[in-house]
Image: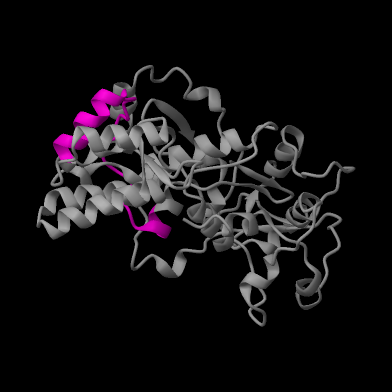
Amino acid sequence: MIDKGSYGEMIITLDDVSSLLHIPITGAFFSVNIFNKDDAAELLGELLVVSLAAAYAEFNLMRTTTVRYSWLLDVYHQRCSNQHWQMAARAFLLFLVGCTLFSDKSAFAVSVAYLECFRDLNSCGGYAWGAAALAYLYDNTREASMHQTRTVSGYLTLLQVFALAFLVYDEDYPRALRWKPKRDKGLVVPFRKALDEIDVDGICWTPYRAHRPKRPFEVVSLFRGWIRWGPKMYAHFPDRVLRQYGHVQTIPGSPLEIVGQTTTPEEMDIMFTQYAVHVVDAGAFVHRPVDCAIEYMDWFRRISHPYIIRREPVYVAHSVAEPADDDHASEETTFSPIPSKAATARYPQLPSSPTSIMSSMNL
């Protein structure tokens, strides 16, 4: 899930989810129980007034306790026509989270388990939907990184928009042109080459600055600890990407520091609701967007694999923040940069990007 380039690390965080989707990133986590067909059919009957025969027919067709989007929309329209507004609202919300936040690999069905979240329509807004969606995306991108995995699920539109938000463009050209896909069996190679060639000048580290009056920064975005979706938990490490928050990047703490802090979902929930005592000390603000501590890039190159395509070590230009009396002075340290072409020359022949794959999977 973490993008490792010649410039350091980037990752989608709680702040990105809040800024891009405007959904809650604070609140309670919910547990997604695995239902058998009998329990799932009873839940559909109780909350959507679906007959047991209709529920079992759908489950037998799907061979699991999921329902098709088309089937769910039919239920929605029926409840609207009968003016059963609470049932209609539940059907719509189940459809909505199924094709966005918690989209699965089928791309046309949603688990009935999420319906339990909408039992009480007055309180369902109290869930940390953004944090749960981020944990679900972490889970699916982790699986997608495995060699044997051929497809990926999760809210891929969110992932695509996040990636595009942080890229610098030549505004003389359509933004999508830079990542225009090509029909080529060897597509993965130019993808990797294009990603490897992105340097610090190709990144917009704080893309939401102008958007803050509409969606203010939330302190929970600096929470360092576990977020979860159902029984699956994933670590949120804002200290690895401090430049995305407008702060000087320093060497982050060890991930092992939070391992063992919690053992149960209940403990994770308590830790998250008390996020104020688990936020990172972001440190100094950047003088320039790419500022990092003088030792950071050496540390990063030592412990990481910055490039997708194997190559000899190449040092790139980056901005290093040196301690000063005002803690904000910075000094430009220049290494041998990777040669870069002018943007106007690069656009026509720039190879495709993974984001173009995601664009074909819009939900």
Q: Is residue 24 visible?
A: no
What percent of the width, then of the height, locates residue 303?
A: 72, 32
12 or 81: which is nearer to us?
81
Outermost residue on the bottom side: it is 172
What residue is rendered at 46% in x and 55% in y?
363
Q: Is residue 230 left or right of residue 360?
A: left
Q: Is residue 250 above or below residue 193?
A: above
In this rendered view, identify the residue nearer to me: 123 or 67.
67
Q: In the current view of this chain or complex, which residue is farthest to the left? A: 83
Placement of the N terminus among the 4 image quadrants? top right
Q: What residue appears at the point 52 percent right and 61 percent down from the top-left corner? A: 206
User: Residue 348 or 181: which is nearer the viewer?
Assistant: 181
Q: Position of residue 280 (x, y in %)?
A: 44, 39
Left or right of residue 5, residue 48 in this image: left
| Residue at x 80%, y 52% (from the top left corner) | 185
Q: Count the marks: how many?
A: 0
Residue 82 location in percent, x, y?
Answer: 10, 56
- Residue projecting furthest to the right: 312
Rendered location of residue 46, percent (x, y): 14, 35
Q: Is residue 111 visible?
A: yes
Residue at left offset 21%, top offset 36%: 44
The residues colored magenta run: 18-47
What colouring does the structure picture have?
Answer: one colour
22 on left or right of 306: left
Seen from the viewer's position, the closer of residues 118 and 271 is 118
